[in-house]
Image: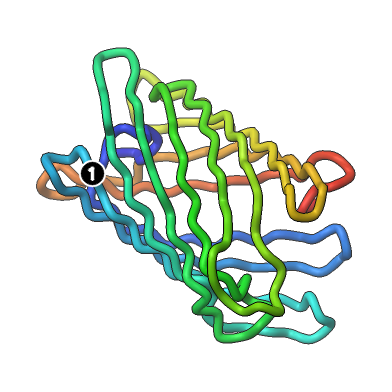
Amino acid sequence: TSGTNPAVLNRTLSFDSEYTRLPTGNYVNNTTFRFTQPFADNRMSLRLKVPLVSTAVLGEGRFGLGDISTKWTWVADINLKTALVVEAELFAPTASDRVLGSGKWSLAPSINKNIIIAPAYIHNFSFAGDSDRASIHRGDFDLYVVYTADVKSWWVTSDLALSFDYQNGKTPAAWKVQFGRNLGKLTGGGAINGFIKPGIGIGGDRAFD
């Protein structure tokens, strides 16, 4: 019920806020609502993500709706040691302000093998949208590792990401660590969880500090 196992699909409602400081000295803050609904005997799920974005990237404050996305997840194979998870996320250009979104429809399919040490490759490409906005063509390699305490009440995750931005010829990288804890149980087997997730950008092409 912690949400750290990508092969266990639970009905989930989450709300979080992420502050990112850019190398230019500006900032972006994403406040995101997510809802996940499993189906097909918990072998598939659909997730809706609605972001609210605030930024001063152009020297003045902007706030509004970002690009809404929906993600389909399929646990294609699972046993006691490993799992094969296939996903695809569709991003829509719903931002209320030009600087708050990409202006493009984009699709990000991914494949994820294993459930404790989980390497994944995601390829994100745009296929429609505003012709005057930059195209999206990026590959993301992600190494996700989970440590859970024996009492199952808290956990630590490590998330190392390396991107290959083929459109702009850059390779930004980042490392994030999540410290999470169970805050209580819900009737029906659910749980309330809280976490913090600090991270740093790596290399000269890093997207944030």
x and y percentages locating residue 156 in the rendered image: 51, 31
Using the rendered view, name the quadrant where residue 140 is placed: top right
Residue at which label 1 appears: 44
Q: Secondary structure at mark 1?
A: strand
Q: Is residue 41 left or right of residue 86?
A: left
Q: Is residue 182 visible?
A: yes
Residue 177 higher or lower than 119, as above or below: below
Comparing 137 with 176, the one in front is 137
Quadrant in the rendering for residue 172: top right
How is this picture coloured? rainbow
Residue at point 63% right, 43% down? 139
List x then y, in percent, for residue 112: 44, 31
141 horizontally vs 33: left or right: right
Specify few, some or many for label 1: CA neighbours under 10 Å numbering under 14, 14-19, or 20 or more. Answer: many
- The residue lying toward the viewer, choosing from 164 and 37, is 164
Q: Quadrant of the N terminus?
A: top left
